[in-house]
Image: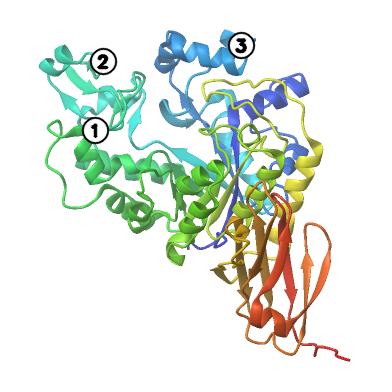
Amino acid sequence: MTAGWPVAPVIYEVNTAVWLDALSRAAGHPVTLADVPAGEWDAVTPAGVDAVWLMGVWERSPAGLTLANANAELQASFRQALPDVTAADVIGSPYCVHRYVVDEAFGGQAALAAARAALAERGVRLLLDYVPNHVAPDHPWVTEHPEHFVRGAEIDLRADPAGWLAVNGHVLAYGRDPYFPPWPDVVQLDAFSPALRAATARTLGEIAEACDGIRCDMAMLMTNPVFAKTWAGHTGPEPSQEFWPEVITALRARHPHTVLIAEAYWDMEWTLQRQGFDFCYDKRLYDRIVEGDTSAIRGHLGADSEYQSRLLRFLENHDEPRIADRLSPSAERAAAVAVATLPGATMWHEGQFEGRRVRPPVFLSRRPDEPADPALADWYRRLLATVGEHRLRAGTWRLLDPSGWPDNQTCLNILAWTWESPTARHLVVINYSAAPAQARVPLSWPDLPGTTCRLTDHLTGDVYDRDGTELAALGLYVSLQPWQVHLLTATRPLKPLVTG
């Protein structure tokens, strides 16, 4: 793990434009990253948070904004999320990057430095974006460095005008992934181009000067096999070295401590981990949690421990629906306990704690007014603080296999795991279902026999004293209501069991 970061960091994502707009409206004047009130920085850095991801700080493309305003489908999505949307609310996509400099609407580069300092005062790191696959059509590279892009010929433009554009005597490809039509607001970078690889390393280095970690958008698109599949016949020969190892090696030479996070899909997580990323999105876990498939969740968590420790778990982000709109309140809490106590990185999304249901499109700077859920927000903050304060993710993680009885297999709905370090033992038990469940949860702690083991539930304050000999032989008996969880710390069983 990169020095200076926790082994399993907790990241809080903030949609920069929407957040600053809300602060500005509350203050009655424009608020930039340079003058965010201290209390608002405190609000996005609750106890247990290690890093804040300021999503979308870079200059947005004027050309991309024009295209967005002319796109009827996008306009309809804006009205659906924000019925009273105005032209001023539409500022363009943060993933249609004009230049990698902080947008003046957010205060520019100096304001970002002030934001980083405010976070550092709270012991919190700063995470920023990079988009490796494409840039805006008005990015300087488009005219100054056509060698950075996938290039075609007039015949390509005539045959597929939706896939190609003519710029300064060159025919360049619109950005895309292999499974969808081209995106009309971005231009495709060439992952096989030596010039582009060198430019990417330089750009990442410049971003790393301003932050502590970088989240790379759609990182799997730049791997050699995916890129070759997408652009066969339109690029030079496939390089012998993969894109990311070459780029990351160059970055690490200048910035060895910058954490790199890959947005990853299509079961490419392990590949990207091996190519140099510290963490990769765990979209598979997210899908299985939302689907409510406990068996699939358990199967997913049975993967190699090294792989597990380098995944980033989440319940929502700016690309996914709000979790309050996908799960019942009880199911959401159960899912949150799971995400908060698994190995790897954890990501939370601004507004998630308050129970927001509307995810504004990233093109918008304003979100609708929604009533906050103070009880839910308090619960989330208590969960994060508890996990952090008690170091519930320190040491060795072990997935457990609860057992049932021939006439009662509700154990299949229970998820359970332990964390064990030289100084503490923790047990997490979750009934991830809408029905009651019972099970025996096996515990492999060798010093249980002949003792009394005290289990304290940090979410309820309940205390349970259990016979260590029975725990060692049969496991811990649990009976949980729908979506009920136990977040337990075991007092080391040093006290002999009193009998008679």
Query: Could you tell which of marks 3 and 1 lies nearer the N-terminus?
Result: 3
Q: Residue at x 27, y 52 (%)?
A: 246
Residue 288 rendering spot, x and y as whole percentages = 51, 46
Q: Residue at x 74, y 41 (%)?
A: 43
Q: Which residue is mark 2?
A: 162
Query: Could you tell which of marks 2 and 1 lies nearer the N-terminus?
Result: 1
Amino acid at dot 1: His
Q: Nearer the viewer, mark 3 or mark 1?
A: 3
Label 3 environment density (alpha carbons within 10 Å; few <14, some 14–19, many ≥20): some
Residue 397 rendering spot, x and y as whole percentages = 56, 68
Q: Hey, which residue is sitting farthest right in the picture?
A: 500
Residue 382 rendering spot, x and y as whole percentages = 76, 52
Which quarter of the picture shows residue 154? top left
Q: Which residue is mark 1?
A: 148
Amino acid at dot 2: Ala
Q: Are marks 3 and 2 in contact (CB under 8 Å)?
A: no
Which quadrant of the rendered structure holds the C terminus?
bottom right
Question: From mark 2 to mark 1, how far is it between C-alphas?
Answer: 20 Å
Q: Which residue is mark 3?
A: 85
